[in-house]
Image (cartoon, rainbow, N blue to C red):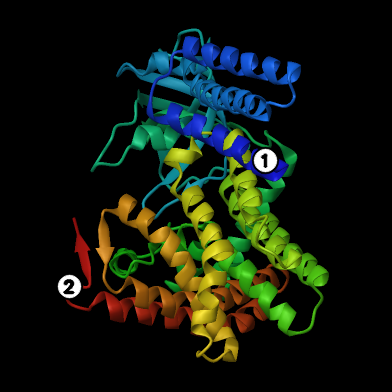
Amino acid sequence: MHKSRVFLLVLISFVLGVGVRSFFEVDMRFVAALVAGGSFFAVHWFLDRSKTWLGIAGMLLMVFAFGIARFSWHESAKEDATVLTYANGNMLTIRGVVEDAPDVREKNTRLVIRATEATLGENETPHTAKGRVLLFVNRYPVFQYGDEIQARGILELPEEFSGFDYPNYLAKEQIYSLMYYPGIELVSSGNGNVIKRLLFLSKQRFEQSIEHMLPEPHAAFLKGILLGSRSSIPAWLLDAFQATGVTHIIALSGFNITIIADSISRVLRRLSVSPRGTFWMSFGIIALFTVMVGASPSIVRASVMGVLVLLAAKEGRRYQGPNALTFAGAVMVLHNPAILRFDVAFQLSFLATAGLLFVAPRLEPKFQFLPELFSFRNNMVTTIAAQITVLPLLLYHFSAVSLVSPLSNILILSFMPLTMFFGFLGGLIGMVWVSAGIIAGGLVYALISYHIFVVTLLSSVPFGFLSF
C-alpha cells in the first residue's frame, strides 16, 4: 500500500477515535487493550517485514486509541475546574481575568474569565479557584481582554434549551459554568498575553472602521460576514437569512473563506499571474485578513481551509486533496477534539472545502454553456459545489429546509467574494483615514444593499421555508 494511503488511514483512524469518544464513554482499560493489541501487531511486523498489513493494523489501532485518549484528556479539564464546586445556588464573588475578546450582543455582553479566586461571604477568606466562567453582563461599563475583575452573583450550570445542547457547546471551549448579570468591579487592566491583546485591539479598530464606513444594518451585515458577529443585526434580517437558507454567511467559517480563496486564485490566474505568484499573493491576503480580524481559533481554522484551496490551485492537481484536507482537519481536532462534534463552523469549513476541492472540478464541465463574464460561471460552480456538501449539515443542525435556498445562495454567494474583498479593503482604509474609508464604502454599500434586497424578497415567497 502506498505511503500516502497509509497516512490517510492513520489520520482517519485518529479522527474516528475522537468521534467515537465524543458520543460514548470509553473505559481506559479498553484503550489499554487497543494499545496492547496494536503493539502486538507492530512487533510481529517488525520481526517479519513481509507482513505489511500487520504493521498498518497495529498503527491504526494505536492511533485510534490515541484519539479516544485525546478527547478524554480534553474532557478532564472539567475535573480541574474547581470553581464548579461553588455552583450551589449561593451568592459568590469570583475574581478572574478576561481571557477572550468580549462578545458584544444587542442586549448584553458576554465575558469569558479564567477564575483565580472564589469568596462565599463578603468578609470570608478567598479560596483558590480554577476554571473558565461565562459572564452575561450589561453592555456598559465596557471591559476588555486582560482586565482583572471581581464578579458577585450566583454561579450556575448551563442547561439545554429548545433542543440545543448548550452544555456541550460551551464545554468545547472548556466552559462549564456561567453567571447572569453579576455585580462587577474592575480590579486591574493590562493583564494577559501582549500579542493577543494587540490582535484584539486590531479587531476592535477594524469594527469601528466598519461602523464609520456604513450605516445600519449594512455595517452589522459586513461585520457578520467578515467577523461572524451578529451583535447588531436586526431580528427581521436574521429571520430573512434563516428563511432563505443563508444564515451560514454570518457564521464565519471556511464556507466563506474557501470561496474567496478560490475566487482570488482564479482571478489572478486570468491576469496571467503564475501559479506560484497567485498562491503567495492570495495567501498574503488571507493572512492579513486573519490578523486584522483578531486571529481567533475559528478564524484561523477557516483560513487554513482557504489556504488548502490555494495549494490545490497552485499544484494544479487534486489527487493530494484528501490527504491535505484530512491532515488539516486532524490537526485542528488534535488541538481541540470537541470541535469535531460540537462546532458547526468547523464542520461547515471542512465540508465546504471538500466541495470546492472534489465536487467543483466535476461540475465545471457541465456549466461550460454559462458566460465567464465577471467570473459568473466560476461563482456558480463553486457556490453549487459548496452547497451540495454543506446542505445535509445545515438541514441537520437547523431542522428546517428553505425551498428557495438554492436560488438565494446562488444569487448571494455569486457576489459574496466581491462584498467581502471590498468590505475588508474599505475597513482597512478606514483604519488609516476615516474619510477615505467612507468613500470606499460606497461600492460596499451597494453590494450589501443587493444582498439584503435578495433575502428580503425571497423570504416573502409563500411556503418558501418549512420547519420540521
Ranked by sequence position, the earlier of labels 1 and 2 is 1
> Residue at the spot x=62%, y=23% of the render?
58
Q: Nearer the viewer, residue 124 or 428?
A: 428
Q: Amino acid at mark 1?
A: Met
> Residue at the spot x=51%, y=60% of the render?
352
Q: Which residue is mark 1?
A: 1
Q: Nearer the viewer, residue 139 or 267?
A: 267
Image position, residue 156 (x, y; %): 34, 26
Query: From the image, which quarter does the N terminus lie in?
Result: top right
Above/below status of 11 relative to 226: above
> Residue at the spot x=31%, y=70% of the render?
244
Please state if 210 lies on the left or on the right of 216 as rendered: right
Occupied quadrant, residue 12: top right
Q: Amino acid at mark 2?
A: Phe
Occupied quadrant, residue 6: top right
Q: Which residue is mark 2?
A: 463
What SS does tag 1 mark?
Answer: loop
> On residue 228, which mark appears?
none
Query: Farthest front residue?
Result: 50
